[in-house]
Amino acid sequence: MRIHVLADSDTRWKWGAGLAVGLAPGSEVHAHMLRGRSTPTARQLAEVGITPASITESTLPEFAAAPELDAADLVILGTVGGSTHAALHALAARFRGAVRRPVLMTGYVGVVYEKMADGLLLRAGADIVLANSPFDRRRFSEVYEPLGIPGSCIVQTALPFLDQRPYDPNRTHARHPYTVCFAVQPSVPADRNGRLYMLRRAISHARLRPGRDVLVKLRSKPGEATTHVEAHHYQVLADQLEEPLPRNLHFVYGNMSETLDRTDLLVTVSSTAALESMHRGMPTAILSDLGVREIHGNHYFVGSGCVTDWSAIDEGAAPLAHESWTADQGIRAVDPFGELRTRIGELLDRPLPPISPYYTADSAPEYVGALLRRRGLNPDGSPGAGATARSSGPMRRTSRRVLKVAYQFGVQRVAPKIQQWGGV
């Protein structure tokens, strides 16, 4: 099978590539990185551990015009809702009147805890919209069916990066001591005080428990971007502290699955790493120190039995997720790709209808028009003036990278210093 994955960040490439490899092992997977704020670096791509047959960086109009899509069997849209909707319009224009087109599939990288209706309607029009659990499938159907969107487009699967290696609670710690991993998030919490609080509690836990290793698992290095903006990088905050860090506290990067191989307790506010640890049967702590709030996403885990706080962790808390909750969340699915393989096979065996995004220039002219213009497209999905002109030569690409890194350096390092000097 020839699969093309459009991704706008390292996380969404990990999701899309993992889906491609999981549902059709041995397939020819091509990567298309959407040029923008979160375009992954070579290091971030290598960290995912999946090597594509080819890789390009392009704008949305350039992607939709790529000649290799004519031979594609499946296109996975691993992008934010607005970009996904724009891609549906661009591909609808590209394949209008064509005898053959690829199957279009999209979905969500993690838990869906905000803007559900908005995100779902922006994804409507894809042949397959993935639901990561029975819980999500029910919710998605409740949005689609009353609006006349066929519920048959919803296919249940599971997050592709849920590793099958189970956690052994009786393992010895000959190679390393009992390990607590704090999985950080780029934008949860978003403010400096909240992030500094979380860092200080991890440091405090390391001091209170000198026999443990405490890992602060970072998503990106200072200057790199990921799915969300990280204005106050934990390592930068640590550099600004006056007291030395305890020797048993370590900042780590790399593949999350490999970090979990040595972890005994996963601690986070609401990272999808919690789903990975729960899938393994590992103790998992969802922090409530800054409140159980929709803005933090930890409200999603209320029924898991894992919501706790740093003080309880200091005292030895190591909660395990309720089995009924994990089952409904699709965390421990036995055959996550079975239904998906069947559905893709059915679609490939018959002519596909024209691509029909939910919003059109007639039904939502202002919304769709603005959404498409921002991404270089005309209201009918065709490329805007000059949109497909190849402007990604070495000099321009280097300039974009330099500007991007300079901006992020200013946000992450210069701005905090100015705030300190000004007493902000």
Image (cartoon, helix red, strand yellow):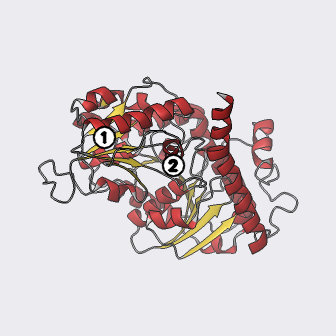
Q: Looking at the picture, how far across and down is residue 160, in whole percent?
A: 39, 56
* Residue located beneath label 2 in the image: 107
Query: Which quadrant of the figure has residue 163?
Result: bottom left
Task: Classify residue 164 as left or right of residue 417.
Answer: left
Q: Nearer the viewer, residue 16 or 284?
A: 284
Q: Nearer the viewer, residue 177 or 322?
A: 177
**Residue 232, disc:** none
Task: Give above or below for 289 relative to 169.
Answer: above
Check disc 2 and report its element: helix, strand or loop: loop
- Identified at 46% across, 64% down, the residue is 47
Task: Classify residue 178 as left or right of residue 95.
Answer: left
Q: In 3D space, how far apart are the residues under numbered discs 2 and 1 (Cα atoms)? A: 38 Å
Q: Nearer the viewer, residue 333 or 395?
A: 395
Q: Give the residue type that dot 1 points to.
A: Ala
- Identified at 24% across, 42% down, the residue is 210
- Identified at 66% across, 34% down, the residue is 421
From the image, which quarter does the C terminus lie in? Answer: top right
Q: Give the residue type that dot 2 points to.
A: Gly
* Residue located beneath label 1 in the image: 206
Which of the two marks, 2 or 1, is nearer to us in this view? Answer: 1
| Crowd rating for badge 1 (residues with CA inside 10 Å; few <14, some 14–19, many 20+) | many
Q: Looking at the picture, how far across and down is residue 103, in whole percent?
A: 55, 61
Task: Classify residue 347 as left or right of residue 32.
Answer: left
Check disc 1 and report its element: helix, strand or loop: helix
Instruction: Determine if residue 86 is in view.
Output: yes
Q: Looking at the picture, how far across and down is residue 37, in whole percent?
A: 67, 52
